[in-house]
Amino acid sequence: MCPSKAELRPGPRLPGPVQTLWYTFDQPGFFARCRSQFGSTWTVRLPGFPPVVVTADRDAIKRLFTGDPLVRRHGNDLLRRILGDSSLMLVEPTEHLARRRLELPPFHGQAVRRYGERIRELFAAEVDGWRTGQIVATADRARAVTLELILELVLGIRDPGLRTRLGHEFETLQTPANNLALFLPEVLTRRARWNAWVYRPLDRVRQLLARHIAQTRDDPTLDQRTDSLSLLIRARDGDDGHVSSLSDEELCDELLTLVLAGHETTATAIGWACDLLAHNPAVAGRLRDDDGEAYLKAAAKEVLRARSVIYVSAARHVLEPFEIGAWVIAPGTLMLVDAQGVHGDPKLYPEPEAFRPERFLEQPPDSYAYIPFGGGAHRCLGAALAMLELELFIETLVQRVELAPDGPPARPVRRSVTLAPGNGGRVRVSRVRAPAIAAAA
Ligand code: HEM
């Protein structure tokens, strides 16, 4: 069965290139307009791509996340030229489950908690550098500190020189040209002589990572190390006497994926947390006075609800006819899960624009109403680490400083796949609380 175009949900009639530009440079405005005009599910047309269906329909999302993963292929192909064929995000459904089994243990909640002490140290060192009256671009600062953290704790890089070089190269991958390139047809962006300059930083990153993997494999202390790379190198999985482990190529693609998926996203969430707390001093005050973990966890969750770091939190090719209401989506169609549409739905979250951590204490949402990390077979591998980082940053922040706004609440602006605070998360430090006292309290 191959339903006709008429069976696609309606969507904007604008020419394809206009939709591409609007999507790239003003995703919040584009999505808001489409939702108000077409409801929870609509079709977007980008030149060079088959039609793409965007949905915030919870029943559809549930079926996308719980259905047979073999007929819910990932829709991450746009990232292939950056992450490589062996990235966990890109392997085909038949191999993906085994890869997940191999890679999951280092990222379990219990495994990442052992990084807590070091994460606290790094965050405290950052916030202790802030002074009363100073304007801090918190998203930029968070980017530096979360990169350091991921390079040390996940990649196990001890050499500060290598960390600095990699940090610089990763930063150069986040240009506006690269943002747009994500949406250009492959024929324009595949590797060629004319666009070699775009690929140069990526090639340098890969060389550095390959060298680091080789050195880690040869490290005589590998068995005692706790960084995620050493655990991934030691990981073994086996069925029917066949034991598999990760090859150098898989490890290289995976490290690139972990840094690119885990660094910018978490830094963006921290920048939003600072912006929200500066504009909501009562929440910051309750976090400071409330010694329970529950409110802290609720605040971290509310940050990711109130400000979706990634509007599209999952992309899946449906490989069988897929019904949404009266429509049948054709096999092969790319479906995008509109997380921001779900998180901003007033039926699920009354007064959705309000920053109210209490809502997670009063009536926790069901799994398909809270989806910052996507869901199903490809759910974010680093979710536990990301939540730990966000909670520890908020805890460190409220204990050590008080923040005030430096202007109106930030507007979301696209940075690669994230929607980051357009003002860099700029806030004013209104008061520094003595770190020693705060730490002892
Ligand atoms: C606030 C921070 C973060 C957010 C909002 C976020 C969000 C996401 C989302 C939406 C996906 C796609 C899920 C899907 O397709 O269903 C994803 C996948 C992934 N994330 Fe995260 N992420 C964050 C932090 C991290 C961190 C810290 C790491 C690791 C260091 C990480 C590693 C990954 C990986 C490896 C995948 C691919 C999983 C797969 O395809 O099987 N992420 N993330």
Image (cartoon, grey):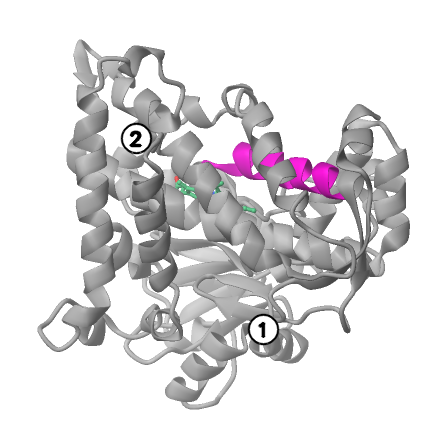
Q: Of all residues shown, which one is farthest toward the left?
A: 193
Which corner quadrant holds the C terminus?
top right
Q: Name the residue under label 1.
A: 31
- Residue found 78% across the figure and 53% down from its top: 277
Instruction: Please provide percent x and percent y for residue 83.
Output: 28, 51
Vertical position of residue 357 compared to residue 26: above or below: above
User: Secondary structure under badge 2?
Assistant: helix
Region rendered in magenta: 381-397
The amino acid pointed to by label 2 is Arg
Which corner quadrant holds the N terminus?
bottom left
The answer, for residue 355, to whether it is visible in the render is yes
Instruction: Please provide percent x and percent y for residue 295.
Output: 81, 35
Horizontal placement of 156 versus 365: left or right? left
- Residue found 61% across the figure and 78% down from its top: 29
Kindly tell me whether mark 2's CB lies below 8 Å from ligand 1: yes
User: Secondary structure under badge 1?
Assistant: helix
Q: Give the overall secondary structure of the magenta segment.
A: helix
